[in-house]
Amino acid sequence: MAQRQQRRTGGVGVVAGLVAVVCAGTAGCSGSGAAAEDGRGGDPVATVRQAADRLARTGSSKARTSMEMATGGTRVTIRGEGVYDYRRRVGELQVLLPQDPAGTSEHRPITELLAPGALFMKNRGAGVPDDKWVRVETAALSDGNLVTGGATDPYAAAELLRGALSATYVGRGEVAGTVVRHYRGTADLTVAARDASAENRAALGAAAKGFATARVPFDVYLDEQGRIRKVRHRFSFVNGQREGTVAVTSTTSLHDFGVAVDVTLPDRDDIYAGKIAAD
């Protein structure tokens, strides 16, 4: 019973702590007429939809995440950095919450472990003992954990592109010194959930129902192997505290493909089973 209670309240506590006071972010983008097709030929929609499969074949990478929001006229950004194993669908991120107005951080970095169907968080605060983890079932979250944890799971971000309804080849460029092809378009969470791997199907399905719209504008930058070097999504969901919708811009950057990833999930005894206080 205690475990079930934790799973229910845990997700609410995380949302309250990380994304409850979110205001409108940047606007969604529309397709550009800069180029009619991929410079290498082929259908841009098909190319974008295959990006997740390219990552799975690559095996692993390092990742940087950025989630941008605005509150009270001030734009704030939650940043993360870590590694991800695309075959096991597990990863680890160190997530930094924004500094206070004086320029100092009120929070220690939160360690997040990403796993199929679950998000584990340490240094969560809100009355959770320092040596305990909070476990959240991602399919139980209205956003499927695309924004709740302050970082989008890198493989979920890639699988969202399986729902691409439209995509335009914008042109060539560079990301961190790597030559990339830039695509812009719109994905549908319902379609993405239908075509996603078993590990992400339920979470993306929850997001399709929980967001203000299932349509997600995106920009994605692929290298010559078709692997994602950077992807930016613009999510929109209903603000529970104020009227209207909230926009969040989530960016995931990938590099150092093939890096060793050693992620060990917490034992059952290390998971906090109590109630999480509101921040």
Image (cartoon, rainbow, N blue to C red):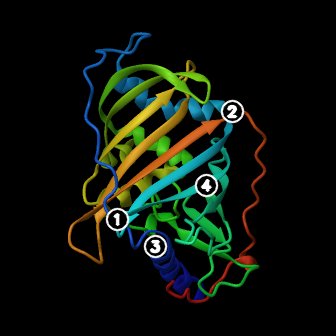
Callout 1 amino acid: Gly
**Mark on residue 124?**
none
Check disc 2 and report the residue beneath it. Answer: 257
For the point 43% across and 42% down, which residue is it?
A: 232
Q: Residues within 10 Å of mark 4 (few under 14, many from 20)?
A: many
* Image quadrant in which you'd find residue 37: top left
- The spot of residue 279 in percent (x, y) is 51, 83
* Structural distance between the alpha carbons of marks 3 and 2: 31 Å
Check disc 4 and report the residue beneath it. Answer: 80
Check disc 1 and report the residue beneath it. Answer: 73
- The spot of residue 55 in percent (x, y) is 58, 34
Q: How crowded is mark 2: few (under 14 residues within 10 Å), some or many (20 or more)?
A: some
* Residue 185 visible from this viewpoint: yes
**Mark on residue 15?**
3
Q: How crowded is mark 1: few (under 14 residues within 10 Å), some or many (20 or more)?
A: few
**Pick the front one: 101 or 172:** 101
Looking at marks 3 and 2 on the same chain, the residue that comes earlier in the sequence is marked by: 3
